[in-house]
Amino acid sequence: MWEPAWTERSQVGKEDERVMTGVIVGVDESESAALALRWAADYGCRRQLGVTAVMAWDYLGQHHLSPDDAFDPRYSADTAAHVLDQLVERVLGADSEVGRAVVLDRATEALDEAASAADVMVIGARGLGGFRGLLLGSVSRHVLHHATCPVVVVRHAARSDGAVVVGIDGSPASLRAAKWASEYASIFERRLIAVYAWHAPVVGQSLDWVLAERGAAEHEAFLRTQLSQVELAELPEPVVVRALEGRAATTILSASDDVASLIVVGARGDRSIGGALLGSVTDQVVRHAACPVAVVQ
């Protein structure tokens, strides 16, 4: 039986020296957060890691069980803890062993602190704030740019039997992503698909594509060489290797359509701008994927 990281439900402030480990999941009243909580609980159970649901609040940033609830001038840490309990129970049931922590702070700062020693941070693609129609909320984007642990972004429920698709480009981050993906695929007994995107260069100002210097077979060989540098976990079946012509983000998303339960990518690839914590390919995959996406630092 796995144990929650800790089950303190009273107010947690910045002065609190306890460190949350295991799986941390950001929670609010949004549907996206509910999906993230369900994903985190399943992952924690499979990995035998404690899971802690974290909800940030302040006097103006109150959380309520119904969108019709009025502003409460007496809102307190105990109120927030009760709301968090109810939100967890709505998703996981009254007997859930997921730990709970309410934090008096802005969501970005609270999740930064919570992720400092976490194994994995899980967040919904977007919460209740911001503009409708945004593909990625400001809190989710902040966590992706600042977390030092793998971050899983959940927008849609995962397929129960889908494959794990990992994007490889030869960068150190993508090789770490491959290792993380193989461990996930091994534990969940899923097929692992490794994708490498390549495209022919453009000559001068011409819009005509020229032939790639290496054929498709050589690109596949490059991908296999990259995978050989990673200590992959024991998998239920051999890794499926796909070297596909096209732009990286589009290729990864296309290879994942209707088959993936999870996409895994490195935080930034070998073409990212120096100092950028989140590459453009990763950003596009997170924004448009039809399944959860794990971003590995």
Image: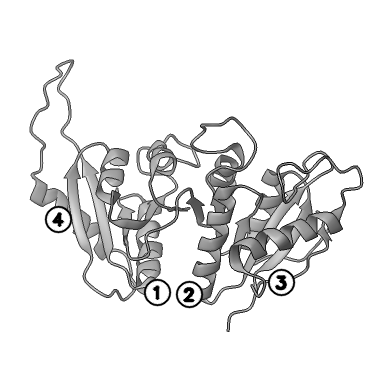
Q: Residue at x 53, y 74 (%)?
A: 45
The tag on residue 6 is 3
Task: Tell me the distance, in whole angstroms, between the alpha carbons under discs 2 and 1.
Answer: 7 Å
Q: Which one is earlier in the sequence, the residue at label 2 or at label 3?
A: 3
Task: Tell me the distance, in whole angstroms, between the alpha carbons under discs 4 and 2.
Answer: 33 Å
Work out whether residue 56 or residue 90 is closer to the camera in this orientation and state it.
90
Residue where numbered disc 4 is placed: 221
Residue where numbered disc 1 is placed: 187
Secondary structure of residue under mark 3? loop
Rendered view: 112 above or below 43? above
Of labels 1 and 4, the one closer to you: 1
Q: Position of residue 215 (x, y in %)?
A: 8, 44
Secondary structure of residue under mark 1? helix
Which amino acid is tagged 1? Ile
Q: Are the two marked residues, 1 and 4, in contact with CB atoms closer than 8 angstroms?
A: no
Residue where numbered disc 2 is placed: 46
